[in-house]
Image: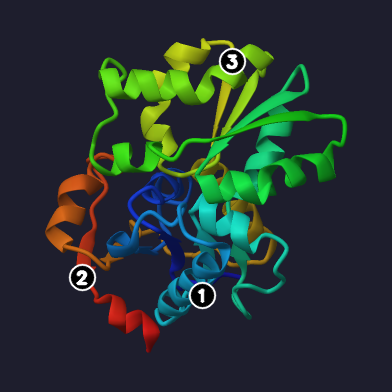
Amino acid sequence: MSDNRAVGVFDSGLGGLTCVSRLKDILPHENLIYFGDNARVPYGSRSKETIIEYAKQDVAFVKRHDVKMIIAACGTVSSAVTGMKNFGGDTPFTGVVLPSAAAALRSTRNGIIGVIGTSATIASGAYEKAVKEISPATRTVNTACPLFVPLVENGITDKEDIIVKEAVRRYLYDIKCSGADTLIMGCTHYPHLTEAIREYLGEGVELISSGAAAAEYAKELMEENGLLTDSRAEGELICYTTDSAELFDENAGKFLEKSIKYRVDKISVEELYI
């Protein structure tokens, strides 16, 4: 059994490309549709009602491309819709919360897991709930990092940058003091701050990329349900953005390997309301 339709991935901005990058590593023959709602980024400062409305529009847009699976490569969206059954309708759907929680629990040795995310993600408690459902005895230390997405979207990620260093120190201080040996980077933008985070927390802390965890979970799900392509050709990546295609192209290279080829088209926010 096989299915040659594309896999759909969406995010509020560019962060979800970390999930795409991992998908290209482990499923190089799959066609991918990526949607970044850059005109409305960040989602993390919005109300839950607004986030869910945006997510519904994002899913509807991706489904126009006859995808066989949808990945919400956005911690904020995933947190808001966790527990909402059949969010993708009749299309298999996953967010990043459950795959990341499972990956963190496989990693931790001392049962203390740090969680960082947008304000909306942390307020939802979604990662903590997911961890506790699997392992009630595990402790989570949860911290909102509202400046991380704007920093990454603007390419300010160097570990020596004074703003990056201060933001990391300020946000991760409690997690460092807690003795956590594993950190869930609960937003797909955050892996681009890996060097700064690792330098502050130390090499002994395992960093879980939520985008990569979701990609690996999606592969397992497609394998189990006979949804993998039988094509041996390199998969195509088509990207859509609600902001400037030129700006998307200029910044996408920070999230994707340079060898990954793609095309990007701009759509208007109004098209999401159709």
Taking the spot 45% from the left edge, 18% from the top edge, the residue there is 169
Taking the spot 23% from the left edge, 37% from the top edge, the residue there is 155
What's the mark number on residue 56?
1
Q: How is the image coloured?
A: rainbow
What's the mark number on residue 176?
3
Q: Which image quadrant is residue 18 in?
A: top left
Asked which secondary structure carries label 1, the reply is: helix
Badge 3: how crowded within 10 Å, few (<14), some, or many (20+)? some
Q: Nearer the viewer, mark 3 or mark 1?
A: 3
From mark 3 to mark 1, how far is it between C-alphas? 36 Å
Which comes before the other along the chain, label 3 or label 2? 3
Residue 207 percent location from the top left of the image:
55, 26
Taking the spot 30% from the left edge, 60% from the top edge, the residue there is 38
**Mark 3 is on which residue type?**
Lys
Which comes before the other along the chain, label 1 or label 2? 1
Residue nearest the viewer, comparing 230 with 198: 198
**Mark 1 is on which residue type?**
Lys
Left/right placement of residue 108 relative to residue 74 reads right
Outermost residue on the bottom side: it is 274
Asked which secondary structure carries label 3, the reply is: helix
Q: Nearer the viewer, mark 3 or mark 2?
A: 3
Residue 130 percent location from the top left of the image:
74, 46
Left/right placement of residue 203 relative to residue 232 reads right
**Mark 2 is on which residue type?**
Lys
Taking the spot 87% from the left edge, 36% from the top edge, the residue there is 136
* Residue 138 sits above or below residue 24 on the image: above
Residue nearest the viewer, comparing 90 with 61: 61
From mark 3 to mark 2, how far is it between C-alphas? 41 Å
From mark 1 to mark 2, how far is it between C-alphas? 19 Å
**Residue placed under numbered mark 2 in the picture:** 266
Residue 45 percent location from the top left of the image:
45, 53
Q: Does residue 215 show up?
A: no
